[in-house]
Amino acid sequence: MLKNNEIKARQIGLFFIAFLPVTKIFIMPKDASNIANEDMWISILISLFLDAIGLVSAILLYKKHGTSFYSILETNLNKFFSKAILFLYFVFFLLKAFTPIYEQKNFIQNTLYETAPTAFTFVPFFILSVYLCTRKLRAIGRLSDLFWIFTVVGIILLTALSIESADFLAFLPIGANKAKILKANYYITPWFCDAPYFLFMIGKFRKNKNSTKIILLSFLASALLTLIFALTFYSVFTFIAGRELFALAEISKYSTVINSIGRIDYIGIFLLLLSGTISAILPIYFSAEILTKILNLKSALIPAIIINLIFFIAFIFFEPFHVLIITFIHKIASPYLLVLANLLPFAFLILRKKKTGLKINGEYNALFKK
Amino acid sequence: MRFLKSKLLILAFFMLLCYFFSNDFGLIDIEKTAIVTAIGIDKNEKTGYTVTLQIAVPEANGVTSENAKAVIKGNGKTVAEAIQKIGEESGWYPKLSFCNLVLIGSNMFDSDIMVAIDYFIRTIKIQDSALLAGVENRAEDFMEKATPLDNISSFSLQKILLKKPGMTQNTLTTDIKEFALGYYSRTGSSFMPYIKIIPVENSEQNSQNSKNNEQKNGAPPDSEKVVFDASSTLLLKNGKVLETLSKEETLSALYSKRKIKDSTITVDKVLLNGKETDFLLNVIKTDYSVKTTIKDGKIVLSIKEKVFVKVADETDKTTETGYLPLSIVPKEVCLKLENDLIKSLSKAIEKSIKTKCDLFSSDLDLYRFNNKEYKKLNGDFFNNLSCEIAVDVYGQKRL
């Protein structure tokens, strides 16, 4: 029997497939194309590679300490420092949350609504978010079990419909925009940096002999889905890829199938939007969990309400400044996200394993039990 | 049971979420929606642009009748503003998702037309796959016209531009996306069909028959009905129209850009048995290859066309026993067609070089497959360009 705050290794794998690619298919391919043109895929590959480093570091960290990230911090650093690091991750997840929520909102508003909807149209999203934030990790695991198929079917359907109009030679010559590859990579960083999701899951999943294999292979599958979608997007739009704001809605509509039987691509779009909704909530979920730990609260309800309220108000009052906020996240906060997602888990590997007096093999530390 | 109930609840929740986010709760009333079938854009000296929307008016009645149409105009400094004004002034919310045709008036040809088209790339309210064409005179005039068979001119134009296999394919069609791809390419080259109006000569009886229909659906009288010709092509550089390809040049360029099936082509004045005979050939299929290479420091554009034909009709007996069997094509006809296609393709390439409009994407070919040499050119692409054309026409022969 799984405890409420436990997740299976299989579910972590499905979590990667269900929720990691789906936030990277709205605007990321467009922005990467806008900067690096035909070399955009190299920038994406670098970001995926950096994420893989973060993930492997987190796996090694777990293998070394065998307990949750909270326990590792608490046993190796003093209370102040461990809370300070948790606070850094709290800010990390807040910064990471803005772009996917804004993208989802903007996409739905522009593609599904003929007339501008009111801000309150998106209230159900925040209600769902508050509800999810109060659930234990097991709920996320169950959602992964359900949503991975939505993401896979959605991406395969849209890609298959787009292949007819794709020009895969558009990526030639490889490396023509060398100077811009890293620039694009820097800008798209906030869409990646996914390793901390796993970092906050370590010590909370049932380990078996195949766990590492399952987690790494699933990450590879999720990276492949991201890359396939981005490659198809650029090969469909080539020179105008940097101008196509809604990759998801545009990519497959040139297919002859769609011309003859109508917009069946919307089936795929809806599936991805459903996965995207949960995916956009995830950074809020983890930030609420961290805030609960920092404030030593028993329930995540208050932090969840506070964080969701902040985002709801931000989307009502700061809507005219969204470009400024997104530019800040992508141009100024990128190094911060990169360090916390990939460098810090790697740096934590130098922490020595300490005995806490608590049972730690396979179990997370009782101190941080929800 | 409890487990099933919670599963059903989750399912119902997601169904509700689907409806909610798809805006199915907020559908616009069809009676208040203007379904735009075509957009015409003209330059307007005073306000910037005049946008004319051709609107199909859906009417619920028991009688099968021709579609009625409405034409609404709006002026604005930008195309988006003009469209917005139409909504503001008429109260009808223009629904652009069904618009499949964008017409550009000839008074826009001497300026960068992408300034007007760019809005359609950025917005998702209109499909990027909508056809794009330039028209003689003003685009708004086209919106008012009707053909003898179609009251809504855009329906007729779409049939002319988008021909299915089995119909004569002679237009070099383009859509908003393809046009923008060319415009934003390194050479800024694009093309679009040029549409001309051809007045219809009507018999008196036809005119009488149509009078009853005129008052019913607001169609113009038969004397004003027209047909369209879209067989020539406009060449554009950086969004400005610089040259026009004739009907023959368009056809030869079409055979080097797209694979054609089940079309027709005419071959005139073939000298057979001392007589000049005209032929209509069925084009079974065509094939092509376009390659750009560098030979001795010169860029060489090599175009090879293969055209498989059979005789559809001829103006005179070509054998002693009578007309030719349908599939047999005399060698002279093949040779004449090869020469005609080479001649017109050469002219098309000449115009393309003169205007520096990269009609065959040779610049892109070189950039992709010969990048080092491409960089050495320093943008001096068209001055170094020469071409090699080979056209092979295949027809069945007698044993």
Image (cartoon, grey):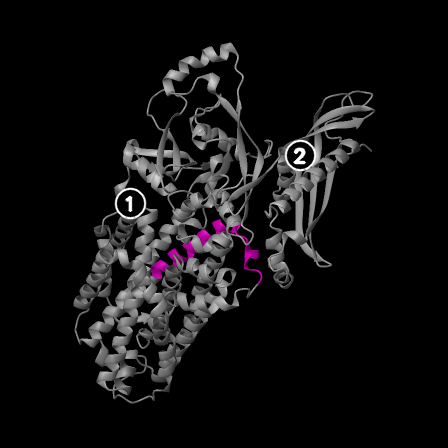
Q: Pointer 2: residues within 10 angstroms few (<14), some, or many (20+)? A: many
For the residue marked with disc 1, what is the amino acid?
Asn
Residue type at mark 2: give it: Val
- Residue A185 location (% of width, % of height): 44, 68
Q: Nearer the viewer, residue A1 or B12?
A: B12
Label 2: which secondary element: strand
Look at 31% across and 47% down and name the residue there. Answer: B22
Q: Residue at 61% across / 42% down in the picture?
A: B258
Position of B197 with respect to A103 (left or right) is: right
In terms of image quadrants, where is residue A58?
A: bottom left
- Per the image, the residue denoted by label 1 is B23
Closest to the observer, B8 or B193: B193
Chain letter for mark 2: B
Q: Is residue B315 at least partly visible in the picture?
A: yes
Where does the magenta region start and end?
A145-173
Q: Is residue B31 left or right of residue B289?
A: left
Query: Vertically, is A300 above or below A345?
Result: above
Disc on res. B283: 2
